[in-house]
Image (cartoon, grey):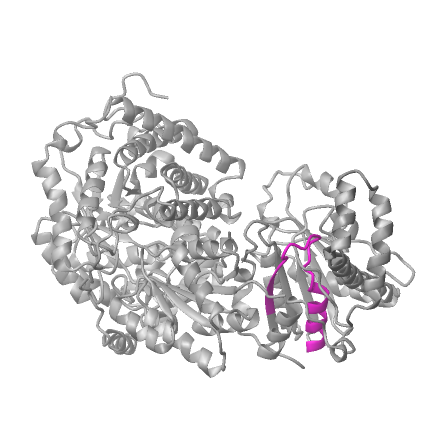
Amino acid sequence: MIMQGKQLTKLVTRLESGERLPAELYARTGRARIVGITGPPGVGKSSLIDRLIDELRRQGKTVGVAVIDPTSPISGGALLGDRLRMQRHSEDEGVFIRSLATRQHHGGLTDSTPQIVHALDAAGFDVVIVETVGTGQDEVEVAEVADTVVVVLMPELGDEIQRAKSGLMEIADVLVINKADLFSAGAARREPRSQNRGEPRSPNKGEKWERPTIHTSAKSGEGIATLCGALDAHHAYLVSSRQLARRRERAARAEVIRLLQSQMTASILRALEAPQSQTILTNVAKRKLDPYDAVGKLSVRILGSNNRSSKHVARSPR
Amino acid sequence: MTEPREEPGTFPFTRGVHATMYRGKLWTMRQYAGFGTAQETNKRYKYLLSQGQTGLSMAFDLPTQIGYDSDDAMALGEVGRVGVAISSLADMEQVFDGIPLDKVSTSMTINATASILLALYLAVAEKQGVPWSKVSGTVQNDILKEYIARGTYIFPPRPSLRLIADVVEFCVKEVPGWNTISVGGYHMREAGCTAAQEIAFTLADGIAYVQTCVERGLAVDDFASRIAFFFNCHSNFLEEIAKFRAARRLWAHIMRDRFGAKNERSMMLRFHTQTAGSTLTAQQPDNNVVRTTIEALAAVLGGTQSLHTNAKDEAIALPTEESALLALRTQQIIAYESGVTAEPDPLGGSHYVERLTDELDAKAREYLNKIDNLGGMLKAVESGYVYKEIYGAAYEHQKAVERKEKIIVGVNEFVSGKKLALKMQKTDPKMEPRRRRDLAALRKKRNRVTVDKCLATLGKAAKSSENLMPILVDSVRNYVTVGEICNVLRGTFGEYRATHSI
Amino acid sequence: MKRPTKVLIAKAGLDGHERGALVVAMGLRDAGMEVVYTGIRNTPEQIVAAAVQEDVDVIGLSSLSGGHMAQFSRVMKLLKKEKIKGVLVFAGGIIPDEDVKKLKKLGIKEVFGPGSSIASIAEFVKKSVRSK
């Protein structure tokens, strides 16, 4: 481990607050396997991660975990209750768990999640797990940071078909049906596409990845070893098929675009503070000026100001 | 909702489980006690019995409740604090030294380790020469509420339900006078739920236990009359009376219509009540005597079978002898001086009370339907639904108090300048080291071979589906300790991991 | 950008009553803080480890079974041992007056007994964190 304890936690806090990741740390990233775990609330993601940590530690791997919970739009506060289910790992020096609040960011991650994932990667963890809430179309950002996306669902008759259409299923590399023990004896197991339940195998070079469906019970531990096997298989697939490089490119692109957007938004808001900008906006409201023409006028002002902006990445104030 | 002409002692027992209620026999005055050492507990029991208390109630310390011996590392700082420390038969014998078990009825507040503590009690009876058929009492033995409102769980739900059914099955045959489960709403109410939720969640727990025993192959009429309940009595006087009436009506219907009980005794909801600890305040503690009196009166007018009244300092620590006595006197004054015992359900027929009864009945049914739709109480608990409901209600209550929508005299209104300090009972700091020494001596004195044999048999039996009670009784007879038994069971059953959060 | 105050609400020892801790946790969330709740049955070691990883500004310790002296003093010792500075520690639950003095000597800034309002706890936390 390169970085631990207080040093790491303080770094994460700085990243959370909008500071940039030091370049020398970024140069050290790319080694860790990034696993995203998402799914609707209440399916047992945190309990699953608790078990996964057991298994990964048994294999001698170190694990960094970022768990994300929503910030209340009303109070600005957050109740970060996922750690509770992993708390027994707190003293394990090979495990680092950090709870993060979304702080009004939408899409499932926080503003700083990519940077925090880099920090955990650079710190030397073998596996970095990001847990987010994912209910549907919007919360698919996790795919931008993770090499492997695990979507966790619960056995609910009828809803399975809905899931098939939602954005979640499009990003899932591994599908987990948790709370397998809640199946009543006679209930039919209906799943989006019937998948083989056996050992997921890594496809040969050139083959497509066949998404496995794994039934787990975080309570009993059933299926956890199989899940770990699936994660290994997917990673092997990514490497052998060059998909990993492609994903990393996608992630890098997404990260840079985000940072650019953030910087741009900050410039835009700064520019709008100027009295001349206020006049433009008032004219739009009064129907004296068309919104598109307003943009034309403001663009000149904004692009001009952006060239003069500082090298430090600005985060748009919320 | 109201049956035509409901009468006390007749189905659905809204007005009381007996035709004459307290005219025939008063409720049992059962004050919770037990703290520190077995000797101190024995002394306090003898005192309370001499003062007219008619039933014994046993509280255990957290290590005993969670299956750790007093010398276990996990017990550090907790031995003898919230109740008596029982690690072996030697401790249990001391508690009941000079107290013949065929002359008293003992209620034990014990859940995850109920089977073991019952085994210990039966072993003491054996040593006293009292046949098990003459032994009477209760074990709380109610694990579902532990996962959400009280926290003294050990094993996951399924093996825990197995142990509960083992106790029921064993007692049907061997200890017919024993109340095998006391399904509790008290703690969930203390945790913050509403009166309607208290009814619903308690009865839902009861349904889960009855279901488990029925699936075991037991006939409902063989065991149901030995399932008792334990309710809270809170500050809203009339609502609480209505709550008890609604609960009786609902349970009678559940037992007859859902479980097909034929014997009326299976349909009677009999319950112990404790006045609400959460209504007691540290500020102006004498006010608590008044609160407890009102709450006790509601429980009596609500037809309770057994009652614990809180001492005024119960909010802060274990009660002193003086305040414990006053709490007992409170019940005696209600029983002998107030005249409310003259008629069963004296408030029956009051427009308001009948209306409240119907409303609570309806609200509770809504919750019960919701729980059924979730797949039963076990799943409702595991899914976090019940947890969210309870602590959500607790939070709403707190906000109401801080907004002064709910007034608590002496706390957010009518505050007196001075805050009164209470005299408190301290636990002896030398106790823990003494317990460690005593246990070390016990372990040396025992026949190690027999102990190991018992533990091996237990381990094997736990993996099978056989009833564990006989081996538990045999083990404790041979001075196998509570912690040793639980460690074996932990190995087989695993440990429960809290999974829910707000 | 200044981040919201981060709080760890922790239950030590075997006590399993969560109402007080949960109500305070929810209250502080509604007061705009980020609150991590540890659940029950934490050792002092687990509490301090969580406090470090979460990089909290505040720790709230809850105890109702009487084991607070042993457990809380161990937490304070560990915080010192790990050289964790600048973290505000407060306690709540059933804690006798004479123990309050002892706990304050150990560095616990305030002890909130039964009947304390969330508003007063939130106010206390805000003021104490501001003055750091």
Q: Quadrant of residue A34?
A: bottom right
Q: How many numbered circles are shown?
A: 0
Q: What x and y, as percent, mark residue A31?
A: 77, 74
The furthest residue to the top: B4
Please name the residue shown 24% across and 61% down the image.
B317
Is A100 above or below relative to B171? below
Q: What x and y, as percent, mark residue B163?
A: 40, 52
- Which residues make up the magenta segment? A97-123
- Of B50 and A249, the residue lying toward us: A249
Q: What x and y, as percent, mark residue A111?
A: 69, 61
- Of B379 and B190, the residue lying toward us: B190
Q: Is residue B255 magenta?
A: no
Please name the residue shown 85% across and 45% down the image.
A292
Q: What x and y, as percent, mark residue B419?
A: 22, 59
Residue B259 seen anywhere in this rendered image of the structure: no
Does B423 sit left or right of C77 as displayed? left
Q: Is residue A121 magenta?
A: yes
Quadrant that contains the N terminus of chain B: top left
- Of A230 and A238, the residue lying toward us: A238
Residue B211 seen anywhere in this rendered image of the structure: yes
Does A65 sit left or right of B240 as displayed? right
Does A160 sit left or right of B393 as displayed? right
Does A128 sit left or right of B79 as displayed? right
The furthest residue to the right: A206
Please name the residue shown 62% across and 55% down the image.
A45
